[in-house]
Image (cartoon, grey):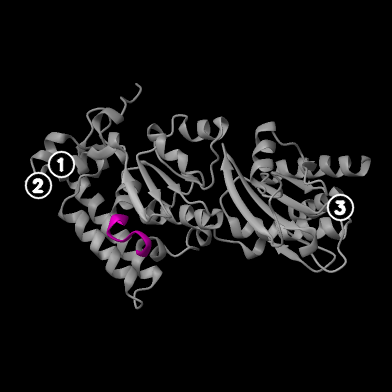
Amino acid sequence: KQQEFALQQNCSSIATDRGGKMATGACILERDFNADVLVTWVYPEISPELRSIFMRKCGLKEMENKPAKIFGRYRDTWYYILSAPVSALGDGVSIPDASAISVVVLAEEFWPEKYFGLSRVLMSQFVDGGGSGTSVLTSMLSVTLRGECKSKSGEEFALSQYRDVKSAYMKPPIKEIINKFGIETILIYIAMLLKKRIVVVCPDVSSLLEITRTIPQFVLKRLDWSILYPYVGMTEDELEDISNDKTHFVAGFTDSSISVREELYDLIVDVPSGSITVASHASEFFAMGKVHKEIAMFMVNSAQDDEVSQQNLLKELVGRTDMLLEGLNKLASPSEHDEAKKVVTMEAIKARKMPASMHNFLYNLASAEGMLASQVLPTAN
């Protein structure tokens, strides 16, 4: 215990010097032979709220014969949970009093492939060490000091393998979502473009995680995955986390009862039924014109065309988004409060001969881009 405490102190100070990206935290959960789940090791410390979330989401109680991966976010902390029955960890492997284990890695960024890569090594070290948390901490310290770690059984992790976080953004193909929801996919695009609240419902956690992490690709030019809450529980603390002053997010739920909480979302994507529904209070934001229908048909046709790659589809979608934003900028004029900033008024929009639906869409787009006069504050003298 004294050795483990000393290592924790060293790792903590070094992590602070280096920014703490790879040493945010970790913990081990174990299921005993009575099917009780306990947090058995923590570094450096974890809030009671996070402990409760890990206990709920690790899946150890119902786990049978195969490993499982879960990732999510609570407040500003990303967590990556790798769980496995001890029987699946290799012949002759045993951990005292444990029938299944979870390794949780905490981080400040969204990058599942990177942190599951680390969690695999930590799990291997935990097993090799006979269930010792000290061996896990040693690996974390190695990453902090040398940018890499290796378990006794040969599992390796190196930061040098993960140089560009954009690779995490491009992993799931957007074509799968478009083919699933067809022409209604345009509602997801509009919700993303106008920075609305999107809820995704899917009972299968693995599918839910893939779909939610893909949705920000619809407005790829923003490269904003900070809006993502891929797996949210129907508990007061987690619902409060997405509702507190948040006007734009993508949140995933396995519990379909979220659908009755219409005040929490503007658009709900129901994966099992393949349907997308606009909340009654948000219908004005989703009125469509010719340009939306053209984008919708482009997405559907491209997704069905095997000769159109994921990269080319996204490139064209970014181009069409740029055209909308360029059109908006042409309607803008310098703000009376700050001439360096351009603002858009409804009067300027209405001066263009367009259908009323496009007037409202462009005004709402200007709001999403922070280009309304009311959003530009006077500069201090």
Q: CA distance from mark 1 to mark 2?
A: 7 Å
Does the magenta-highlighted stretch encompass residue 184?
A: yes
In the image, residue 39 above or below residue 136 = above
Of marks 2 and 3, which one's residue comes earlier in the chain?
A: 3
Q: Quadrant of residue 369?
A: top left
Is disc 2 placed on a helix, strand or loop? loop
For the residues labelled 1 and 2, say whether their Cβ atoms are less than 8 Å apart: yes
Where does the image place residue 307, in percent across and percent down from the top left? 34, 78
Give whichever of 270, 337 is nearer the camera. 270
- The overriding secondary structure of the stretch rendered in magenta is helix
Q: Amino acid at mark 3?
A: Gly
Mark drawn on residue 354: 2
Is disc 1 placed on a helix, strand or loop? helix
The residue carrying mark 1 is 359
Q: Amino acid at mark 2?
A: Met
Q: Residue at x 73, y 58 (%)?
A: 84
Q: Quarter of the image for the C terminus: give it.
A: top left
Q: Residue at x 20, y 37 (%)?
A: 344
Q: Residue at x 34, y 74 (%)?
A: 308
Crowd rating for badge 2 (residues with CA inside 10 Å; few <14, some 14–19, many 20+):
few
For the residues labelled 2 and 3, say whether their Cβ atoms are less than 8 Å apart: no
Is disc 3 placed on a helix, strand or loop? loop
Where does the image place residue 260, in percent across and percent down from the top left? 40, 36
The residue carrying mark 3 is 131
Give whichever of 381, 321 is nearer the camera. 321
Q: Residue at x 82, y 39 (%)?
A: 9
Crowd rating for badge 1 (residues with CA inside 10 Å; few <14, some 14–19, many 20+):
many
**Magenta residues, start to end:** 179-185
Of marks 1 and 2, which one's residue comes earlier in the chain?
A: 2
